[in-house]
Image (cartoon, rainbow, N blue to C red):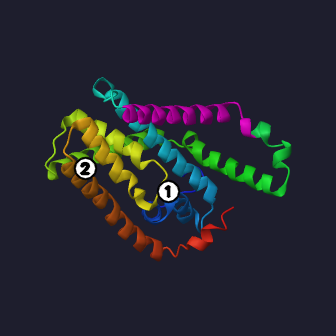
Amino acid sequence: MNPVEVIPLHPLFGATLVGYFGNGILAFRLGELLRAYAVAKGRQITVMQAFGTVILERILDLVIVVFIFALTIPWFPFEDDYTRFGAFVFTGITVFLIVLIFFTVHFNWLGKIEYMAIFNSHYGQKLFSAVNRIFEGLTIIKKTNHAGLIILSSLVLWGFYYCSTMIVLDACGLSLGFVGTGILLVLGSIVIGIPALPGSAGTYDAGIKYSLIMVFNISSDKALTYAIVSHAISYFPLVLVGAVYFMLGNVSLKEVKTIQ
């Protein structure tokens, strides 16, 4: 965000936790928008610009998951129809988003459609302005000297995700090996990325249980135990700490409706 505004680390950390809190209590991962609002509140950067950086972060996450998927292709369980379908759809969406963003920026598509009739109305102008600001946030990585550091930090973060997955598996008495853990991390990322109930309630547990049973031949009881434990340790701490930052930041869900 430095090209737009220099924001200290602690407020960004707090906004991130507010986003996790929002994802935990709001459906369809609307916590991401709440996070952008928390970042932009009282600052020069607009909510939509901040939301663009959040989308950029999520796209980087998608790319890393696809990279892990590529590394595990020789061992990936393509014989399962649902797993194969999910992996290919996930990869296809990621590639499509990257290509769409590249062509939109490279060929200035926004500049070419700005004067179309659909954007001449009041609401059309507001829609175009919002989309334009989102793209400003998305392309902010081009204007910073920290692109390499951003990518490195994403890789380190996913390294922690991988290690935590191994630790929880071990705590539940399961051993999938290095490759199996990577495959489970990919499948879990696909499941948790589906916009659903608050905190991915039901979706994550069912998806992880199915993956462990069908892909790794884990018993139903052990699969369910891991699904519940891994979901709980990734849900409750973030939601509780996020709730504290939500209250300390005086962020109101009603205020989010006024985003422009």
| Sequence-first disc among 2 and 1 | 1
In the rendered image, the vertical position of residue 241 relative to residue 123, given as above or below = below
Label pair 2/1, CB-CB below 8 angstroms: no
- Front residue (pair 48, 84): 84
What is the chief secondary structure element of the magenta stretch?
helix
Disc 2 or disc 1, which is closer to the eye? Answer: 1
Local secondary structure at mark 1: helix
How far apart are the alpha carbons under marks 2 and 1? Answer: 22 Å
In the rendered image, the vertical position of residue 204 relative to residue 41, given as above or below = above
**Quadrant location, the C terminus:** bottom right
Q: Which stretch did the figure color magenta?
A: 81-110
Q: Is residue 93 magenta?
A: yes
- Front residue (pair 164, 50): 164
Q: Position of residue 105 (x, y in %)?
A: 66, 35
Name the residue: 20% across, 48% down.
Answer: 169
Can residue 45 be seen from the camera position used here? no
- Which label belongs to residue 136? none
Q: Position of residue 137 (x, y in %)?
A: 60, 48
Q: Which residue is mark 2?
A: 164
Q: Which residue is mark 1?
A: 29
Name the residue: 57% across, 63% down.
Answer: 37
Name the residue: 50% across, 32% down.
Answer: 92
Name the residue: 82% across, 46% down.
Answer: 118
